[in-house]
Amino acid sequence: MVSVLLYALLWASFGAGHSALAAPLGRGLLRRIAGAGDRLAYNVIAMVHLALVLAIGRRLFADQTFALPDSLRALGWLAAATGAVVLILAGRNYDLARFLGLAQLRAGTPDQAATPEPLATGGMNGVVRHPLYLGLLLIIWGVATSPFRLATAAAATAYLLVGIRFEERNLLRLYGDSYRSYRSHVPMLVPRRLWPR
C-alpha cells in the first residue's frame, strides 16, 4: 500500500510539473531560458521527469507478473497492438517536428509566437477527439500484466483524464466555435464508430 501511495505521489508531481510548465508563467520562464527552444525544453523536462517517475516506480514494486489466463494475456496484447495502430494513424494528423519543438527551434520562433496549426478533425481525429491518448491508453492497459504496470496504467489514466480537461480548455480558447462544434460531434475517447468517415 505504501508503494502505491508513493507512486501516486510521484505521478502527481509529474502532473503538477507538467501543468506548471504549460501554464503562462511556466511558458514565459521556458521562453526566457530557452528562447526558440522553449517547446523542446518543455518536452525534454517532461521526458526526464517521467523517466524518473517510472524508474522509481519500478523499484517500488516487486518484480512479478500476474498469473493471467492465456486468453486474457492475448486480449491484452491485441489491445496494445490496436493502440499502436491508433497512434500511428493519429500521428499522421500532426507535425512531429512541431510537436517536439524542433520546427520552432529551426525557425527561431518561440512556441507561442508560432502560427497555430489548423484544427485537426479528419482521420482518427474524426473518430475521437484525442486519438493519441486513446492509443496510449490501449497500450498501457494492454500490457498491465504486473503490479508495476497496473499501477502505471491507473496513474497514467488519471493523469491523461485530468490533462484532457486542461487541454480542451486551451483548444476552446484557441479555436473557439470551431472546436465547440467539433466537440459536440466527436466523442472524447470512446469511439461511436471504428473508422473515420
Image (cartoon, rainbow, N blue to C red):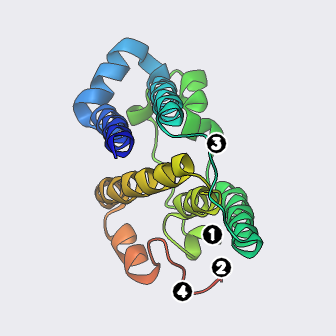
Give the residue number, with chain letter if any, for mark 4. Answer: 192
Which mark sits nearer the N-terminus, 1 or 4? Answer: 1
Pointer 4 or 3: first along the chain: 3
Q: Nearer the viewer, mark 1 or mark 4?
A: 4
Mark 1 to mark 3: distance in Å?
16 Å
Residue assigned mark 2: 196
Query: Could you tell me if the residues under marks 1 and 4 are in contact, i.e. CB atoms within 8 Å?
Result: no
Return the x and y of residue 62 as percentages of the image width and height: 54, 40
Q: Name the element at disc 2.
A: loop
Q: Is residue 69 above or below residue 116?
A: below
Q: Which mark is residue 96?
A: 3
Instruction: Kindly identify the residue that appears in the image at 75 percent across and 75 percent down.
Output: 71
The answer to whether marks 1 and 2 mark residues whose Cβ atoms lie closer than 8 Å is yes
- Give amino acid for label 3: Leu
Horizontally, residue 197 falls left or right of residue 15, namely: right
Residue 119 falls left or right of residue 90: left
